[in-house]
Amino acid sequence: MNIVIVGIQWGDEGKGKIIDILSKKVDYIVRYQGGSNAGHTVVVEDKEYIFHLIPSGILHKGKICCIGNGVVIDCAALIKEINGLESSGVHIGNRLKISSLAHVIFPYHKILDELREAKRSKKIGTTKRGIGPCYADKINRCGIRMVDLLNPRILREKLKDNLDEKRQILEKVYGHPGFKFQSIYKEYLHYGKTLSKYISNTHLLLNKVIGQDKDVLFEGAQGTFLDIDFGTYPFVTSSSATAGGACIGTGVAPIKLNKIIGVAKAYTTRVGEGPFPAQFTPAFDKFIREKGNEFGATTGRPRRCGWFDLVMVREAVILNGISELAVMKLDVLDGLKTIKICTAYKYKGKLFKEFPHDLEVLENARTVYKEMPGWEDSVSNVRHFKDLPANAKNYLSELEDSLGVGVSIVSVGSSREETIFR
Ligand code: GDP
Ligand code: IMO
Ligand code: MG
């Protein structure tokens, strides 16, 4: 069974926890897009691991983890992550495979990310990890791939061209002096050497093992509404975070995917700028942020919080072909008198049940809510669906009915054990 795990809100839904849990049952785990802008948290016996590039399945001995061609790689960040895992006793050995076709993030991508962001009148609130500029170079056909780090002549040619062009942009548009060739060339040749043992043709490997009936888990980063096409553009990331990205970002054909699991929080969060119709009022926003510890796993920035938004998630279910849902952080809603679910938006007298594309509507719409009674008791210790408080079950049933998809996993805490399977 080949399963895609995809975030169906604005990222940080709890994908890392779900990937970790499901990794036990598969043979291979592959990340298909994004870069070190991602922060996927896995908690095992009180120890917290935050993965940026390495798939969240790496903690399971014997599982092979691939970084697909669709990912953009910050080599220094990746080496730091490998070393960090090794020093905390997680042996990687030959369990990590990096696609030779994955594109590499260079210092000019990071600085351009930062400088462009500073110049924008309307900020995106990027993570400043160089993601957008690196994907832009990929599409512009001047990108440098992992395989290029292994060929000094090709790296020299490509890096020279890039540094020349970027120096002019950096100087003329941003007043930045640009970068010197020699030190970057040496640094990246060194990264190539360090990582060479992991670099290979991951798309042929994945197709081969799928042909041998091995099971593969496809790990999405970010979320549906950060997708470059379907997200709240331009307040999005620069890759295809939706399930379709799993094929493009790994070289595995759509016909080989068996199941798409959508991961959603029991409420909504967003980090960075951009519209958020169902955002809480400021005082409640602060309350839930603290209760749910809603601070970015990569940048530490506070996440904005809001009610579960059916207008968004209905669209995400369609876009991703979601066959089942994992609902995360139900425990954070413990003790609330009333819980609201956003069912539609209203703008200038018009009712929107479908996700609007016009930013003006998204930025100014009022939200229409259905209210449901909350539950008193903590759900953190519940391990069977039947033992959840009646109102928690009602809340989940309402989501299922409204979305037309079943909830197969309910998460009631950050650790592996705090999970209900149905
Ligand atoms: P990802 O990017 O989708 O992998 O999600 P993040 O790791 O960025 O954010 C999810 C956060 O919620 C992490 O700190 C997790 O440890 C935590 N978390 C996951 N599931 C639960 C849950 O059911 N309850 C609580 N309280 N925390 C959770
Ligand atoms: P995971 O995988 C939440 C957001 C940034 C910003 C926008 C563009 O942990 O869910 P970028 O640096 O990608 O150009 O920033 O996207 N963003 C995320 N938000 N979770 C993420 O990843 C994110 N990765 C990027 O905050 O608004
Ligand atoms: Mg995250």
Image (spheres, grey):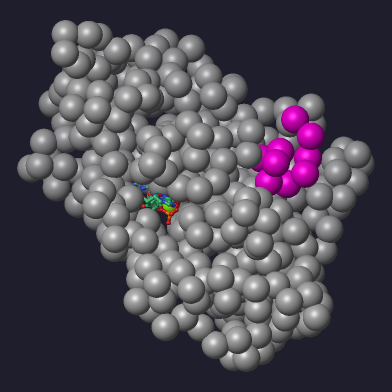
User: Tag count in the figure?
Assistant: 0
- State which region is magenta: 246-254
Is 247 colored magenta in this rendering?
Answer: yes
**Residue at 37% from the left image edge and 24% from the top image edge:** 357
Q: In this view, does 246 lie to the left or right of 284?
A: right
Q: Position of residue 288 (x, y in %)?
A: 20, 43
For residue 348, which quarter of the picture?
A: top left
325 vs 184: above or below: above
Residue 342 is a magenta residue: no
The percent coordinates of residue 184 (x first, y second) are 59, 85
Front in this rendered view, residue 418 or 368:
368
Residue drawn 69% across the image and 59% down it: 102
The quarter in which the N terminus is drawn is top right
What residue do we see at 77% from left, 49% from top? 27
The reply to whether residue 21 is visible in this rendering is: no
Residue 160 appears in the figure: yes
Left or right for 111, reference 283: right
What percent of the width, then of the height, locates residue 170? Answer: 43, 73
How far across and how far down the image is residue 369, in percent? 20, 17
- Report whether 298 appears left or right of 199: left
In the image, 37 versus 118, the foreground residue is: 118
Residue 141, placed above or below residue 254: below
**Image quadrant in which you'd find residue 152:** bottom right
Between 406 and 114, the one lying in front of the other is 114
Residue visible at 48% across and 12% down? 404
Please tell me in which quadrant of the rendered image residue 35 appears.
Answer: bottom right
Q: Nearer the viewer, residue 48 or 236?
A: 236
View extreme (left): residue = 283
